[in-house]
Image (tube, rainbow, N blue to C red):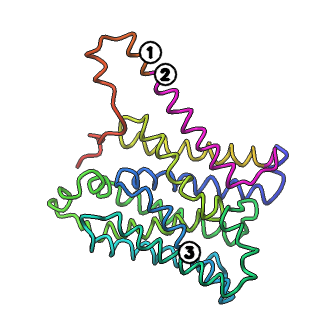
Amino acid sequence: MEMLHYDFMQRAFWAGGIIALLASVLGVYLMLRRQALMADMLSHVSLAGVAGGAYLKINPTWTGFVVAVLGSIAVEYVRRSYKTYSEVSIAIIMVGGLSSAVVLMSLNPSVNKSFSSYLFGSIVAVNANELALIVFVALAGGLFFILFRRPLYQITFDEETAKTNGLPVKWISLLFSIVTGMIVAAAMPIVGVLLVSSLIILPAALAIRIAKHFRTALLLAMLIGVVGVFAGLTASYEISTPPGGTIALVLLLLLLLGIGLQKLYRRLIKKSKPSNQNQELLEGVQPDPTWKS
């Protein structure tokens, strides 16, 4: 294809494909842990790091990355202070991140002109350093999900039982939050602060909707994420639209199409089978017996 002859498009496909695989896996865990808004919150917190880096004349990509990780740690500690209202931690940290970003941007008005790429993404402008950061995050995140797949599985579906079994739930949850911050920060150049949650949540939302088991949901989310990113990049190149918004729109269309096809399939099954067999149709992902220890 013609577009792959350009170096910037090659980097865009590499960066998008790598982060789509990792972000989709993260999205499944976040949704099953009822923390879908965490990705959106950390993306806004990282904006404060970007603004701080621009103000201090430091690479905004790296400062955004560091602040996102620090924000993920802060969320975990605030969440423990509000055990009954754990979602309050997301609101508190988001307010802190956004207010800090606004203040830092006001101190240096010239920074506002270059903020559109951070808000909406500019994957075709991903440089070698940002690609190296994405590869590092992919390796670290992939290693975490592989090594802690069984503890994460138990904590995701039954945290109290995991504690009873002697798992260090506190530290695993903290590591999970840190990995989440890293992935969110790495995904920012692809779809931007305002759309980063689409890359993480939309593939997982469709996978959880149609998959019957946990492992199937993970694999399906990865496939949907990669297809969405590649299709979005191709469409963006062909019709000259912003890559981040195009990728998010393609993922949303895939979600709507998947839900529509699932409903159509269930209607056909309902007509062809007796009513008592319809109970076998599963509503969303279920714990996979093959993963139980």
The local crowd at label 1, few if under 14, some if 14 to 19, many if 20 or more residues have their Cα within 10 Å, is few
The mark found on residue 189 in the picture is: none
The local crowd at label 2, few if under 14, some if 14 to 19, many if 20 or more residues have their Cα within 10 Å, is few
Q: Which residue does the numbered mark 2 point to in the structure image?
A: 264
Amino acid type indicated by mark 1: Leu
Quarter that holds the N terminus = top right
Q: Give the residues in magenta.
A: 237-265
The Cα–Cα distance between marks 3 and 1, rounded to whole angstroms, is: 48 Å
Find residue 156 and report its horizontal and vertical position in percent: 30, 54
Amino acid type indicated by mark 2: Leu
Residue 138 picture quarter: bottom right
Residue 250 picture quarter: top right
Secondary structure of the residue carrying numbered label 2 = helix
In this view, the residue in front, 273 or 115, is: 115
The mark found on residue 65 in the picture is: 3
The mark found on residue 268 in the picture is: 1
Secondary structure of the residue carrying numbered label 1 = helix
